Image (cartoon, helix red, strand yellow):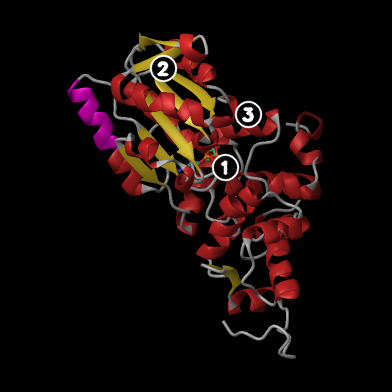
Amino acid sequence: MTAAEDPATAEDPMTAVVRPTPESDAELAFEGALRPKTLAEFVGQAKVRAQLQLLLDAARLQNRTPDHILLAGPPGLGKTTLAMIVAEESGRPLRISSGPAIQHAGDLAALLSSLVPGEILFIDEIHRMARSAEEMLYLAMEDFRIDIMVGKGAGATSIPLDLAPFTLIGATTRSGLLPNPLRDRFGFTAHLEFYEAEELERVLDRAAGLLALEIDSAARQEIAGRSRGTPRIANRLLRRVRDYALVHESDGLEAVQAALALYDVDELGLDRLDRAVLSVMLTRFDGGPVGLNTLAVSVGEEAETIESVVEPFLVRIGLLTRTPRGRVATGEAWRHLRIDRRTDGLFGHDL
Ligand SMILES: Nc1ncnc2c1ncn2[C@@H]1O[C@H](COP(=O)(O)OP(=O)(O)OP(=O)(O)O)[C@@H](O)[C@H]1O
């Protein structure tokens, strides 16, 4: 692939590397090419794989549609990939939609009524669906039926409509935002965890093989250690390293370190947004507690991005804690950013 075909290389380094959401056709094509097609190929998440396997085997033995599945976890951990694998392994067609695309109950009614028997419906970001659609979904999930309202006011009537049996797979980065009645209607909730470095090395090994790239184990370890526990980020960093190696005719660990330094990915895998969040907490709020919205405004980012993308990783690596009064940076955060804590007692609380 040349740079001209690859818009991601021309983007701002921060958005190109940091953002977990694909921004371009090239990114989507790249992700698509690397997606595992079967549960056996899917690296890590052993518990979730075993749980899904059982669910699929039971449905197959009883010749019925698999139960509805909720996939919960931060972006880039493999929710869409798992939905595609479920469809593939159960030999069923897959329909893909997303919460933001379902802004009215009518949008959902149109989608549900056009499903063929046994189809799998994947709704990404299901927590962002309209409330009226959510309510329609309760009945659809439970009884494969919806009530369509016709007319308004006193003359309004509801017409019941039977649906073909289907399996709903919902994906969410914020399962806490789903109303209980919706959450309860999923037969199984899979909580995807951040990946261990060794698992990310396997993801990279597989990706390098598919892309016909040579990568030695030191380079693989270095990329894995800076990938925020996230396969999508590991694959993207691999691509940036490949670019660097190509242009500078260097390889191995040296190319990895130079490329990742260029794209502002530090040795813990923190990017500019992570560091901006921590830096604001330390320098303006003496480490916290700071409320989510204050933090979001201070770094010019949406609160949802801070909460679903930045925070889970910072909490996981012990740089941030959540308290009832707000977010608090840990002593490790001060050390990592090499910022000295002010001692004039102006803020005055210890971690
Ligand atoms: N377990 C895995 N093994 C190998 N590759 C993986 C794995 N999980 C994810 N990937 C790769 O990471 C990329 C992102 O995965 P995916 O799109 O499924 O994440 P997601 O959780 O759906 O993200 P989002 O919430 O942003 O939609 C894909 O290209 C896929 O190839």
- Give the spatial CA distance, label 3 vs label 1: 16 Å
Q: Is 55 included in the stretch rendered in magenta?
A: yes
Q: Is residue 25 magenta?
A: no
Q: Position of residue 225 (x, y in %)?
A: 56, 60
Q: Is residue 307 left or right of residue 73?
A: right
> Closer to the camera, 12 or 162?
162
Question: Is disc 3's CB within 8 Å of ligand 1?
Answer: no
Numbered label attached to residue 93: 2
Q: Depth-wise, is mark 3 or mark 1 nearer the camera?
A: 3
The part of the chain drawn in magenta is 52-62
Bin the neighbour count of mark 3 within 10 Å (Cα to Cα): few under 14, some 14-19, many 20 and up: few
Extreme residue toward the front, this view? 154
Is residue 188 something one can see in this rendering?
yes
Residue 257 appears in which quarter of the rendering?
bottom right
Say which residue label 1 marks.
208
Q: Who's the residue at 54% across and 28% down the image?
A: 98
What amino acid is labelled 2 in the image?
A: Pro
What type is the residue that disc 3 sits on? Answer: Ala
- The crowd level at tag 1 (other Cα within 10 Å; few <14, some 14-19, many 20+) is some
